Image (cartoon, grey):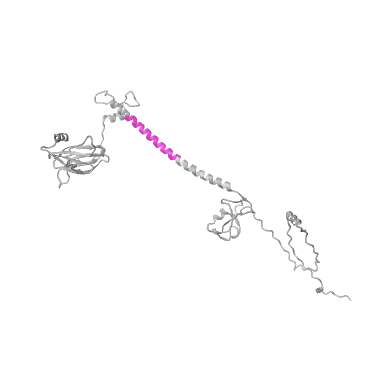
Amino acid sequence: MSSVSDPEDEPEFVAEHRLVIPLDEEEAEDEGKAGFEVKPPPMVQLDASLVDESEVSTSTFNPLPVLTQTCSICFEAWTTSGAHRICCLRCGHLFGKRWLATQGRVGKCPQCNARAHAKDVRVLFCKKIKAVDTTDRDRALCDLDSERKLRRKLELELSEFKFKYQVASDDAIRLRDELSSLRAVLSAVQTPRKRPGAFASVSASDPEGTPDPKCQKMLTGSYEIIKSMLLSPTGRCRVVAACEYINLLCVSQPSSNPLFKGFGFRKVHTGELRPLKYIHLHSQPIRDLALHPEHEDGIVASASMDKSLKLTSLLVDQVGYPDLQRFQGPHSVVAIASAMRLLQV
């Protein structure tokens, strides 16, 4: 009678899945030198009828992701400096720094769409990733930009100097023409008259003596009215004295104030052609005004028909200069020169 064997008494077989990592040749040689023997794992034969296929799971081994050497956006090589320097976000994806800078302070990862901030950008100093050294190129571009700015600045300065040179050349030509005209006038004055009532006009460019229209106009004494001004509505402006060193004219006129009747003179500015202050002096009309021919002290002497002679300072508008306030005579004073002779006597 045959006995049936109990399946529980049969030995159990366990299937193990081992991950075998192959070593490089150098590592194998190092281990062999250290006394380790590299042997393949033992092979176990299993009976297919004893192994349940549902219990045996097949493992799929995905290879480790290979780090790429180019940017995933522009597919350009990484650089160690400059705008395309390699950097990463908090999620770990690698990009060029210039692409992250365009996102602003708050943006998203271009690859996984994860939210990121500007503070999450990290510059990487990589050893395993090949990066193109662009230090020399960036330095050359910076030098090129500096040279362009310097060239632009020099071009602006050159154009400015050209304009100044053109202005100076025009001024030199104008001054040369004026000098030629003045030399012609001087030579015409120094030469004797060719005919009565006319001056000889000799131009520097025309030694034969052909009259120059400009010089002829200057020599013949043509005058024209530039400006007219009203000093006294009643007239009676008798005499005028000129003070060249302070650009003043002293014009005698009657007082326009009915409360202070009399006569004086008004100062007129020769440069601006405008009347200035009126100074009241005498009770009768003024016959003469004069300044000292040698001393430029700004003192004007006035002679009047009220038998008096007064000295007035044009600088301080003060009547009666110190110790020379008024000179009273027995008769009416007609001219300053005769009055000074009488005073000296």
Query: What residue is drawn where x is 60% and y is 56%?
Result: 94
Task: State the image coordinates of residue 297 (x, y, percent, origin top left).
Answer: 23, 39
Query: What residue is drawn where x is 47% and y is 41%?
Result: 154
Quadrant of the image containing the C terminus: top left
Q: Is residue 3 left or right of residue 225?
A: right
Foreground residue, 46 or 345? Answer: 345
Which SS type dominates the magenta stretch? helix
Q: Say which quarter of the image contains residue 123.
A: bottom right
Query: What residue is drawn where x is 35% and y is 33%?
Result: 175
Quadrant of the image containing the N terminus: bottom right
Foreground residue, 296 or 172? Answer: 296
Q: Decide if residue 234 is in sight here.
A: no
Foreground residue, 146 or 56? Answer: 146
Q: Is residue 17 left or right of residue 101?
A: right
Q: In this view, does 343 lie to the left or right of 209?
A: left
Task: State the image coordinates of residue 263 (x, y, percent, origin top left).
Answer: 16, 42
Q: Give the range drawn in magenta.
A: 158-182
Instruction: Indicate whether residue 176 is drawn in magenta.
Output: yes
